[in-house]
Amino acid sequence: MENDFDMKLDSVKHPESTSSYHAVPDDESARNWVAGSQTLDRPVFSRPSSALERGLLKRLLAACGNPSIRIVLWDGAAVGVPVGSQVGDVVVRDPVTLRRLLFDPRVAFGDAYSDGSIEIHGPLVEVLSSICLGVERAASGGLLARIVNRPRRRRSHTLAASRESVHHHYDIGNDFYRLWLDERLQYTCAYYAKADFTIDQAQLAKLDHVCRKMQLKPGERVLEAGCGWGGLALHMAERYGVSVRAFNLSREQIDYARQRAASTGLAGLVEYVEDDYRNASGKYDAFVSVGMLEHVGPENYGELGRVIDRSLTPNGRGLIHSIGRNQPRALDPWTEKRIFPGAYPPSLGEMLQIFEPTGFSVLDVENLRLHYARTLEHWLERFERAAAKAAEMFDARFVRMWRMYLAGSIASFKSGGLQLFQVVFARESNNNVPWTRSHLYAAQPDS
């Protein structure tokens, strides 16, 4: 077994990145293609795949719920659904990649796609959606299933670790995010109040949706935890007449937000603080966090609740907007390792650990899962149009990595593996709360 399936992976390096994958209509033509009928920029492996390798690959697909895909190996051998019934083909270009895929599929798949040693023929989002749906329905038994779903060590969320995680993702350059985000640089789920909204219209609608949920009034003070590039704080100050103190650990985002506040004449109403939310002080009428809870870690939910409790006035209320799960489960390990270090999408039950110990009442919960899928579709379209510029900033591997991240996120939201929760809350003794939801839909913006 060791001769056929050498697990000494550390001694073997991946080949360099590859060109795009061409169509492989059936097994016979796949063998001809690999044998030289197409020009490849990778070495062609003469040794055929072994029965052991193909058998383990079948078991891996079963552990992943038998998605509607074929895996085509370097010699043209294919494993999976019959030809013609697949959503797409996943081509494994060399034996080393297959070994890594079998050993740690949840990390190796994304890495191999990024460096080109795995190629996908067919619509990327649909292929990934098929895999996501299969994994969601897969049984948990069996050795390979346990390998696929084995627990991982979580990254810590100390002050130092949180700063490092934020730097890894958000401080890679504002110019990169300008390529594909909306004009306000909103990097969270948009709100499609109308089906034909552009990304700019939907992000503006999201800002208003959040503000209406919090029932903001002129002259109130708002504490924001995790402010991104500052768009929500500026919107609250300009449109709703409140003052905002916004916390963020990203130096690049804070610098950008401060420049925007100064250029729009709102610096007197908005203060951007480069610090952790845990160091917030003062009293506020409202608390808001959009897209930050994913980076807090469940072990810190109690502390977040205490920060909110000590910060809000007796009639205070708030909103938390976060990616989530239907059941407690970690973020997929490739995304956590390569894109979002330390990220964790909580279930609603886990989120309640913010509110229950301090006696906050949950007033409203809305799930915008499909809105996030649409948001990501718009981001991916814009990212693809700017891919050449992104490659100039970084390299081709970086572009493929981020393509996998955006497309995989669409697949996760469409398959139901990820949710998007907006939770509105207030102190349990606060009776100054809306009786209906009519205020949310009275005046949706058109632009």
Image (tube, rainbow, N blue to C red):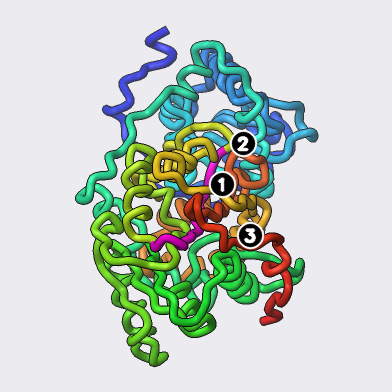
Q: Position of residue 310 (x, y in %)?
A: 32, 55
Q: Secondary structure at mark 3?
A: helix
Q: Which residue is mark 2?
A: 132
Q: Are marks 3 and 2 in contact (CB under 8 Å)?
A: no
Residue lying at the far top in this picture: please name it: 1
Q: Residue at x 50, y 32 (%)?
A: 328
Q: Please determine whether, in this image, residue 169 is positioned above or below residue 88.
A: below
Residue 201, by quadrant, is bottom right
The amino acid beneath tag 1 is Gly
- Name the N-terminal-most of marks 2 and 1: 2
Q: Which residue is mark 3?
A: 377
Residue 212, by quadrant, is bottom right
Q: Can residue 373 be seen?
A: yes
Which stretch is magenta?
A: 313-325
Of residues 421 and 211, the one drawn nearer to the viewer in this rendering: 211
236 within the magenta span: no
Label 1 environment density (alpha carbons within 10 Å; few <14, some 14–19, many ≥20) = many
Left or right of 97, for residue 239: right
Q: Secondary structure at mark 1?
A: helix
Q: Which residue is mark 1?
A: 408
Q: Residue at x 33, y 34 (%)?
A: 154
The amino acid beneath tag 3 is Glu
Return the mark for residue 85. none
- Name the N-terminal-most of marks 3 and 1: 3
The amino acid beneath tag 2 is Cys
